[in-house]
Image: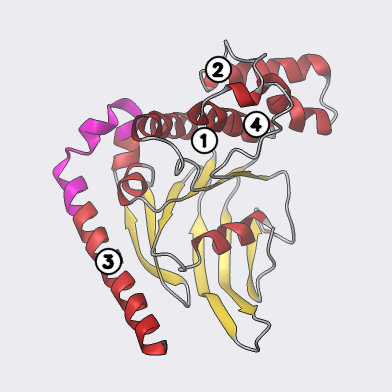
């Protein structure tokens, strides 16, 4: 089980000039094992800060994150991170990148080969294992990043704009892969995105966050991720409720952006 609990989480950054930024304020959230949650919101609403605290890269100024009733105090193998850029070892082959985690855990060589072979097939790179990372396209590099994350067998996968740098066609293919991996592995996934469509497609739960201080503005429970596992994502987008939710959330975020701009003009 990998239930994730976020309790009364706040994060304040103190600046050199004596002022401060309240990035998050009293965020409460519970994720059950195997849930797929997308997080959306205007720039500066604390999405990435929240993800970095769950990852253990940042210590909150108040509250705590618990995974399996254990308080998160730093990075751990039970949480895997996939960044916008793959953060891969470019001097290594695809196979060597995926094998890195198991080797660090001193997994026997035969078992490591099994894990890597399985993951290469899972992400559709079975013919590219010996290629150097720099020889791959951006989409392929993100497939490697996903496989490397899965090789560490984390309980929770954290994704920070993992598809943001890809072209539209590759991004759509990768969205389908994320749904496939979610369904096949049963992992708990939190995905940060700036795309409303992507948040709707990849979130059975979708959080809309409000700007500073960052907090949960609204949560949706949606059928589109489940629908997208077995049908073309373009068909999912044609579902009437999909269009209605997209317009509702776009309007919500646009209003927040206008509020932010208004504050900036007042402070100018």
Quadrant of the rendered image containing residue 146 = top right
Q: Which circle's residue, 3 or 4, is located before the other in the chain? A: 4
Label 3: how many Cα within 10 Å (few below 14, some 14–19, many 20+): few
Alpha-carbon span between mark 3 and mark 1 = 34 Å
The residue drawn where x is 73% and y is 15% is: 113
**Front-most of residues 243 and 91:** 91
Q: Position of residue 226 (x, y in %)?
A: 34, 37
**Front-most of residues 168 and 215:** 168
Q: Which circle's residue, 4 or 1, is located before the other in the chain? A: 4
Label 4: how many Cα within 10 Å (few below 14, some 14–19, many 20+): many
Magenta region: 228-244
Q: Tell me: 48 left or right of 68.
A: left
Q: Tell me: 49 left or right of 75.
A: left
Asked which secondary structure carries label 4, the reply is: helix
The residue carrying mark 4 is 148
Asked which secondary structure carries label 3, the reply is: helix
Residue 106 counted in the magenta span: no
The residue drawn where x is 29% and y is 74% is: 258
The residue carrying mark 3 is 254
Alpha-carbon span between mark 3 and mark 4 = 36 Å
**Front-most of residues 112 and 221:** 112
Label 2: how many Cα within 10 Å (few below 14, some 14–19, many 20+): some
The residue carrying mark 2 is 125
The residue carrying mark 1 is 186
């Amino acid at each position: 089980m990998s239930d994730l609990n976020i309790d009364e989480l706040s994060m304040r950054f103190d600046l050199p000039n004596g002022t401060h930024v309240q990035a998050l304020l009293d965020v409460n959230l519970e994720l059950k094992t195997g849930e797929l949650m997308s997080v959306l919101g205007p720039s500066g609403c604390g999405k990435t800060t929240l993800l970095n605290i769950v990852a253990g890269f940042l210590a909150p100024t108040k509250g705590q994150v618990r995974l399996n009733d254990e308080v998160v105090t730093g990075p751990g193998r039970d949480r895997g991170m996939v960044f916008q850029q793959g953060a891969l070892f470019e001097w290594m082959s695809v196979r060597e990148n995926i094998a890195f985690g198991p080797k660090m855990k001193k997994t026997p060589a035969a078992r490591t080969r099994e894990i890597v072979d399985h993951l290469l097939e899972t992400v559709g790179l079975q013919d590219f294992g010996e290629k150097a990372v720099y020889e791959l396209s951006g989409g392929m590099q993100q497939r490697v990043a996903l496989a490397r994350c899965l090789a560490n067998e984390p309980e929770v996968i954290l994704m920070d704009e993992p598809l943001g740098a890809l072209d539209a066609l590759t991004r759509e293919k990768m969205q389908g892969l994320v749904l496939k991996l979610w369904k096949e592995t049963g992992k708990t996934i939190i995905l940060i995105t700036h795309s409303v469509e992507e948040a709707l497609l990849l979130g059975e739960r979708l959080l809309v966050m409000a700007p500073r201080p960052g907090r949960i503005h609204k949560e949706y429970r949606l059928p589109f991720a489940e629908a997208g596992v077995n049908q073309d994502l373009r068909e999912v987008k044609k579902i009437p409720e999909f269009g209605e939710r997209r317009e509702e959330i776009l309007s919500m975020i646009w209003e927040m952006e206008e509020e932010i701009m208004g504050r900036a003009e007042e402070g100018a």
